[in-house]
């Protein structure tokens, strides 16, 4: 009896020495809509007391409610180039509640140097769960009423600690930025996870840093075009539209996007080009006014400020302006004589189309050329429009602003008819011929592919497996695309951290990051694929100019397998195929003696 009392007193004394972190102030996640089976409930009874933890693959997401079944890994080994982003995932689970869970990454020690565990080089994120659609090929652009919901891990939160409920799982995502200055080699460290009760989980890891260096994102070749929604930032962060605070928040979102290699600024020319298909409308960036004397006046104040915010963040290659072909053909302007806003339907081929767009294009080109001096990077853009509408838009553009180029997301091969469409993105399901690619590249034109809710696999939906996002970069590499487009970077539903679904779209189709610049598993894995694209392009160039193309054989073999496998077939062993390709890339990037 005395012995048991002594143990209890010692435990209480030890707990009293542990820093007690206060309760976490955060939102409440949704209940898991999928009930546990009796067997799954019983599994929690066998979980040992206290905090449990283990390394897990970054290629999968894990249930919050089910005891995880993970293959034991004593020491996680991560490899990458200097300058590369590398991720790892930890799973924590507990039978009883665990308050004040905190994650500490220790300094990473090599033979000749130590990488400090500062936020410049490593960040730990508690992963949050949001409601999503159950994965199903029938759940794409027209989700049916009553489609089953699931709870998925996606958002990388910025909390410093977390309170875990009883019988729950909590992933932790580690993001490393391998420094460019360190010597290549093995750097050893560990992650220490503790809670207010004194429970401790220690997980060792090693960073295998390659001698090669990855350029900064502004120098990447990959043409990433994730469409931005600046107005959505104001609503989601509770800011006044187009206020100074709003533009500061917009810039922060742009900086996060720039670090992924973004090359394009998304702007609008009149009212919402997509007929308000998102939760938040695209608010006007250019105010059109018909003066009393019948002349047109255009106020570019917001338009110019959005450009500045993006360029301050390092995004400047192209400025794609939507659209001469809005989905409902409607244009808004303020009629000074009437003292009211007027909406007109300017359908291509009708007299009002040229009447509205002709004066605007003339003034618009003057503004971007003379006032901003950015005309060389500006494209008039369209999204999946009919060929006859494209014909009329190109005709009017060539008449009033012949030096401007066109950009388009094209699911009908319309680009073949025109010579000034320098930024073309085709649906992934459409093959692009080698002849088309060669012709466009000879003109220094950009050719990319896109996925949206019409693609079940591979995709970046909240029901997609994480490796699918990485596969998109490898698809671009294998099929010789310049990059990829995704229609929504931040077109958030009402409360994305609670429910990722919106309207008829497959869950997560409308965004890749969360409000307040919180990343997601999907976004991080997309960057993984882009970095692989960059590394492969770098090595191909180096080995070609140095007459060592035989070194490329393992990579070429992996790319052949990707090309030979139907990309939209989820029954194929795509995770294995991509792991094989990553391994080949790692193999050829090692210098003699590094193996």
Image (cartoon, grey):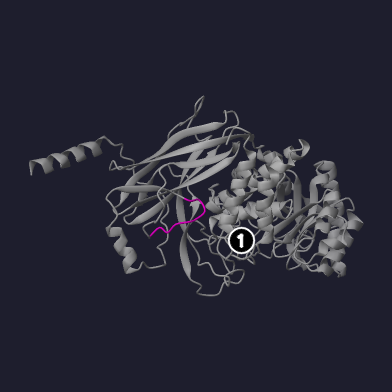
Disc 1: which residue? 458
**Relative depth, front residue between 579 and 101:** 579
Q: Is residue 62 magenta?
A: yes
Residue 339 occupies quadrant: bottom right
- Pick out the residue farthest to the right: 399
Measured as percent of width and height from the top left, residue 539 is found at 70, 40
Q: Nearer the viewer, residue 132 or 574?
A: 574
Dominant secondary structure of the residues highlighted in magenta in the image: loop
List x then y, in percent, for residue 290.
81, 58
Q: Is residue 311 visible?
A: no
Question: Magenta residues, as a range?
Answer: 57-65
Where does the image place residue 61, in percent across and percent down from the top left?
48, 56
Please tell me how many numbered marks the rendered image carries.
Answer: 1
Q: Can you say whether 441 is above or below 311 in the image?
A: below
- Element under label 1? loop
Residue 157: horizontal and vertical position, in percent?
A: 47, 48
Q: Can you name the residue that lies furthest to the left here?
A: 1
Residue 83 showing in the rendered view = yes
Query: Is residue 156 on the magenta stretch?
Result: no
Res. 484 image quadrant: bottom right
| In the displayed structure image, the side of residue 376 where residue 10 appears, left or right | left
Q: Residues within 10 Å of mark 1 (few under 14, many from 20)?
A: many
* Residue 462 to residue 251: above or below: below
| Residue 575 location, quadrant | bottom right
Give the position of the C terminus as an image quadrant. Answer: top right
Nearer the observer, 236 or 581: 581
């Amino acid at each position: 009896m005395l012995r048991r009392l002594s143990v209890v007193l010692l435990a209480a004394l030890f707990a009293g020495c542990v820093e007690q972190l206060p309760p976490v102030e955060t939102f409440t996640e949704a209940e898991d809509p999928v009930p546990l089976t009796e067997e799954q409930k019983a599994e929690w009874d066998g979980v040992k007391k206290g905090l449990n933890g283990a390394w897990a693959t970054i290629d999968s997401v894990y249930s919050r409610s089910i005891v995880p079944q993970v293959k034991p890994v004593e020491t996680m080994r991560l490899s990458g180039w200097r300058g590369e982003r590398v991720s790892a995932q930890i799973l924590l689970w507990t039978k009883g509640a665990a308050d004040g869970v905190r994650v500490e990454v220790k300094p990473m020690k090599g033979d000749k140097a130590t990488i400090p565990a500062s936020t410049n080089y490593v960040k730990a994120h508690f992963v949050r769960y949001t409601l999503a659609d159950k994965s199903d090929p029938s759940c794409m652009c027209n989700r049916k009423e009553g489609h089953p919901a699931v709870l998925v891990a996606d958002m990388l939160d910025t909390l410093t600690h977390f309170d875990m409920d009883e019988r729950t799982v909590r992933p932790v995502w580690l993001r490393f930025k391998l420094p460019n200055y360190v010597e290549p080699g093995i750097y050893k460290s560990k992650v220490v996870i503790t809670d207010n009760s004194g429970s401790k989980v220690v997980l060792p890891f090693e960073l295998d840093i390659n001698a090669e260096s990855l350029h900064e994102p502004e120098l990447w070749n990959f043409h990433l075009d994730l469409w931005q929604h600046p107005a959505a930032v104001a609503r989601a962060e509770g800011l006044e539209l187009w206020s100074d605070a709003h533009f500061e928040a917009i810039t922060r979102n742009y900086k996060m996007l720039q670090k992924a290699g973004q090359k394009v600024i998304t702007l609008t020319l009149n009212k919402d080009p997509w007929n308000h298909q998102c939760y938040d409308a695209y608010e006007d960036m250019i105010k059109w006014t018909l003066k009393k004397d019948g002349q047109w006046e255009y106020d570019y104040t917001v338009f110019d400020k959005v450009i500045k915010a993006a360029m301050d963040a390092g995004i400047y290659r192209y400025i794609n302006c939507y659209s001469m072909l809005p989905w409902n053909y409607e244009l808004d302007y303020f009629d000074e004589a009437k003292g009211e806003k007027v909406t007109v339907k300017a359908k291509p081929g009708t007299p009002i189309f040229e009447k509205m767009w002709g004066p605007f294009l003339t003034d618009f080109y003057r503004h971007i050329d003379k006032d901003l001096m950015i005309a060389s990077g500006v494209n008039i853009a369209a999204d999946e429009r009919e060929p006859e509408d494209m014909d009329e838009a190109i005709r009017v553009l060539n008449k009033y602003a012949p030096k401007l180029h066109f950009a388009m997301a094209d699911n009908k091969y319309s680009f073949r008819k025109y010579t000034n469409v320098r930024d073309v993105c085709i649906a992934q399901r459409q093959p692009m011929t080698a002849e088309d690619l060669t012709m466009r590249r000879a003109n220094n034109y950009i050719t990319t592919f896109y996925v949206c809710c019409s693609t079940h696999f591979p995709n970046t939906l909240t029901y997609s497996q994480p490796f699918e996002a990485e596969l998109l970069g490898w698809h671009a590499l294998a099929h010789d695309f310049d990059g990829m487009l995704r229609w929504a970077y931040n077109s958030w539903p009402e409360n994305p951290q609670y429910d990722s679904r919106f309207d008829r779209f497959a869950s997560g189709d409308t965004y890749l990051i969360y409000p307040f610049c919180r990343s997601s598993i999907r976004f991080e894995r997309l960057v993984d694929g882009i970095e692989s694209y960059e590394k492969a392009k770098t090595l191909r160039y180096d080995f070609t100019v140095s007459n060592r193309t035989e070194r490329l054989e393992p990579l070429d073999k992996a790319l052949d397998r990707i090309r030979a496998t139907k990309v939209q077939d989820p029954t194929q062993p795509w995770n294995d195929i991509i792991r094989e390709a990553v391994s080949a890339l790692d193999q050829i990037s090692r210098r003699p003696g590094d193996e």
